[in-house]
């Protein structure tokens, strides 16, 4: 219990003796008086035992000014120590960005336009619809610089466009201007549909100085937009503390944005568009503009890009007549290659190449789940290692796709083409004449040419564009150098004197030469003699899968006259090899009730015609 003493006591020798007596006597009836000040302020005395006689009181004085000042001093010391440590850490990060010579302004910007960045541009002749521009800035301590640029107002933009049109009108070639109008119509097509494409890109081993420069990054973004035939309405960039840049560009078609980590040499970007323009062709531009290599880096540390592409939004019900099965980006190309973001290597060797009949794509990929990038790099060295002695086992895979459907791969080449050729060639007692339906990449002919009994192989391929593209981008499929030392052979398979490449419709070829209509203009003896001379010992169908959603696939596997002509094209002991697609899963319905209906129909027709299995 505390009580007010009659007088203030000072700490003195008497008090000291009292304290000693308190701890030495062992009594429990002393009183302790606590005084917060030296003046006439309240004191508090703690009674240990009120029933006992009063004993000397001991008082301790606390000065609140000194106590408060001590707390403020400790807080100030801690605050300024933290500020000094933070400055030292930021300075060290800036020094690491470019050695000891690079200095970076870490102060917070107070002016929104410290530097002059390039303004957005518009494709000459392209009509930009009126837009409303609104913005709000939120200055933050984490941003050292901020920039905000946009297209001129509509009246200013009209002046720019009119000047451009005047320049274009001076051109004597009127056809060029009409082509530009057609291209502009294509560019604006689909802008208002709820569907688009999304391209995600990550690049490492990039020059840190480039990644920390708002000006250079903004120039690269504007150039990328121009090369992609897009329209940049405005863009916004922020230089971050200590290092790094974040930019977002508003496109007429949607947006482009990226963020950089200069000390790590990494930039991440995403580009989304809802127009009809394709984004895959922009990848080389992205690599060239943003994959800037540091001047003093090891040549082995080239910028490395990882990317993925996805279709976004809704097409069915909004795009008239849309069928996702006919869109290559909705097939194997989109789901198995473009959508994957973890491939160490993914490079389009041929992208969206249109032939007279189909779309052709060739991709070079390396899946880290199947092969290691380090082994591939080691295979390129001349150090006598196992990898360098057998580089074919560690090279990236090459994939050929027709209308988005996988047709052939480098590591599936041998298992597929050897199995479709050699069992039949070995089973036949003396295969001299062989026909191949399809097989545009040339690997089937390559395997056939390895047999010494062969006198002639005829390949009937309707699409000569596939043959030409395969020759350029898949040369190993047509490489016959392993048998070139034999008489009549050549290093290039189609240069072999036994090879006969015919770019024509296989359906018409067999119907005209071996179908029932071919006997109309021939006598019986002439027909039999010609057939005996032209018939084949082995006939191999290396074309579309029977379950492919393609009109030509249905004809190849279900047309009665065509299938009958195949039977008539073979000698008495001839062999027919048909590629009939993938095996059914355990929970798939019967072929005749599911997606393999064409396969089921053809097998029944072959049995009815007289083929033996």
Image (cartoon, rainbow, N blue to C red):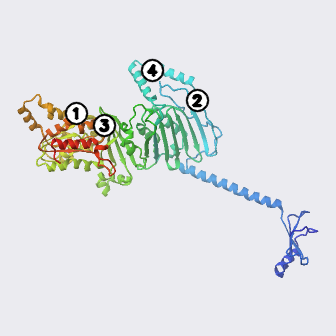
> Is the N terminus in the top left, top right, bottom left or bottom right quadrant?
bottom right
**Sequence-wise, which precedes: disc 1 or disc 2?**
2
Rate crowding at label 4 as few (under 14), some (14 to 19) or many (20 or more) other CA atoms within 10 Å: some
Determine the CA span between mark 1 and mark 3: 15 Å
Task: Farthest residue to the left: give it.
Answer: 525
Which residue in the structure is indicated by mark 3? 550
Judge depth for marks 2 and 3 and give the one in front.
Answer: 3
Q: Residues within 10 Å of mark 2 (few under 14, many from 20)?
A: few
Residue at left 43%, top 44%? 308
Res. 288 mark: none
Q: Dividing the picture into quarters, in which one does residue 69 lie?
A: bottom right
Q: CA distance from mark 2 to mark 3?
A: 46 Å
Q: Earlier in the sequence, mark 4 or mark 3?
A: 4
User: How far apart are labels 2 and 4 at the CA level?
Assistant: 29 Å
The residue tagged 2 is: 132
Q: Which residue is mark 1?
A: 505
Q: Which mark is residue 168?
A: 4
* Earlier sequence position, callout 2 versus callout 3: 2
Separation of marks 1 and 2 at Cα, in angstroms: 56 Å
Q: Are marks 2 and 3 in contact (CB under 8 Å)?
A: no
Q: Residues within 10 Å of mark 1 (few under 14, many from 20)?
A: some
């Amino acid at each position: 219990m505390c009580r007010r003493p009659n007088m203030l006591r000072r700490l003195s020798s008497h008090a000291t003796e009292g304290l000693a007596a308190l701890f030495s006597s062992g009594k429990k009836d002393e009183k302790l008086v606590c005084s917060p000040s030296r003046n006439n302020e309240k004191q508090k005395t703690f009674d240990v035992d009120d029933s006992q006689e009063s004993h000397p009181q001991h008082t301790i004085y606390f000065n609140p000014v000194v106590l408060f000042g001590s707390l403020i001093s400790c807080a100030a010391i801690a605050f300024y120590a933290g500020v000094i440590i933070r400055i030292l850490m930021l300075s060290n990060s800036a020094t690491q960005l470019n050695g000891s010579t690079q200095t970076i302004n870490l102060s917070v910007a107070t002016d929104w336009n410290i530097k002059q960045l390039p303004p957005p541009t518009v494709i000459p002749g392209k009509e930009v619809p009126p837009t409303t521009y609104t913005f709000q800035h939120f200055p933050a301590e984490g941003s050292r610089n901020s920039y905000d640029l946009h297209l001129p107002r509509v009246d200013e933009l009209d002046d720019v466009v009119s000047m451009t049109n005047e320049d274009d009108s001076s051109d004597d070639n009127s056809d060029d201007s009409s082509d530009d109008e057609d291209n502009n119509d294509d560019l604006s097509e689909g802008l208002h549909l709820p569907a688009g494409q999304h391209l995600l890109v990550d690049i490492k081993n990039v020059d840190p100085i480039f990644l920390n420069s708002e000006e250079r990054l903004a120039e690269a973004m504007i150039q990328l937009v121009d090369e992609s035939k897009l329209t940049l309405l405005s863009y916004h960039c922020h230089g971050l503390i200590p290092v790094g840049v974040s930019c977002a560009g508003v496109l007429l078609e949607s947006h482009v944005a990226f963020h950089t980590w200069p000390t790590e040499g990494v930039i991440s970007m995403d580009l989304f568009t809802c127009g009809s323009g394709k984004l895959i062709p922009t990848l080389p531009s992205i690599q060239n503009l943003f994959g800037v290599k540091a001047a003093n880096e090891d040549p082995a540390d080239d910028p490395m890009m990882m990317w993925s592409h996805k279709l976004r939004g809704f097409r069915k019900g909004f795009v008239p007549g849309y069928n996702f099965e006919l869109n290559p980006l909705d097939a194997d190309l989109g789901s198995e290659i473009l959508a994957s973001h973890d491939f160490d290597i993914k490079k389009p060797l041929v992208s969206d190449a249109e032939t007279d009949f189909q779309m052709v794509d060739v991709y070079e990929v390396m899946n880290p789940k199947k092969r290691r990038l380090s082994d591939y790099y080691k295979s390129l060295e001349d150090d006598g290692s196992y990898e360098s002695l057998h580089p074919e086992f560690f090279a990236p895979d090459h994939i050929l796709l027709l209308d988005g459907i996988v047709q052939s791969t480098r590591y599936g080449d041998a298992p597929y083409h050897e199995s479709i050729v050699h069992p039949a060639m070995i089973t036949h007692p003396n295969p001299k004449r062989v026909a191949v339906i399809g097989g545009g990449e040339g690997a089937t002919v390559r395997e056939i040419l390895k047999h010494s009994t062969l006198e002639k192989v005829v390949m009937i391929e309707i699409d000569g564009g596939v043959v030409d593209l395969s020759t350029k981008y898949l040369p190993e499929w047509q490489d016959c150098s392993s048998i070139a030392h034999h008489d009549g052979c050549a290093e290039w398979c189609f240069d072999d004197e036994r090879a006969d490449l015919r770019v024509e419709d296989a359906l018409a070829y067999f119907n005209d030469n071996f179908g029932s209509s071919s006997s109309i203009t021939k006598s019986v003896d002439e027909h039999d003699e010609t057939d005996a001379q032209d018939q084949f010992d082995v006939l191999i169908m290396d074309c579309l899968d029977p379950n492919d959603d393609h009109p030509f696939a249905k004809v190849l596997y279900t047309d009665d006259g065509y299938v009958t002509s195949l039977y008539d094209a073979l000698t008495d002991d001839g062999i027919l090899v048909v590629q009939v697609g993938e095996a059914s899963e355990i929970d798939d319905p019967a072929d005749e009730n599911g997606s393999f209906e064409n396969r089921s129909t053809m097998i029944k027709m072959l049995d009815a015609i007289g083929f033996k299995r």
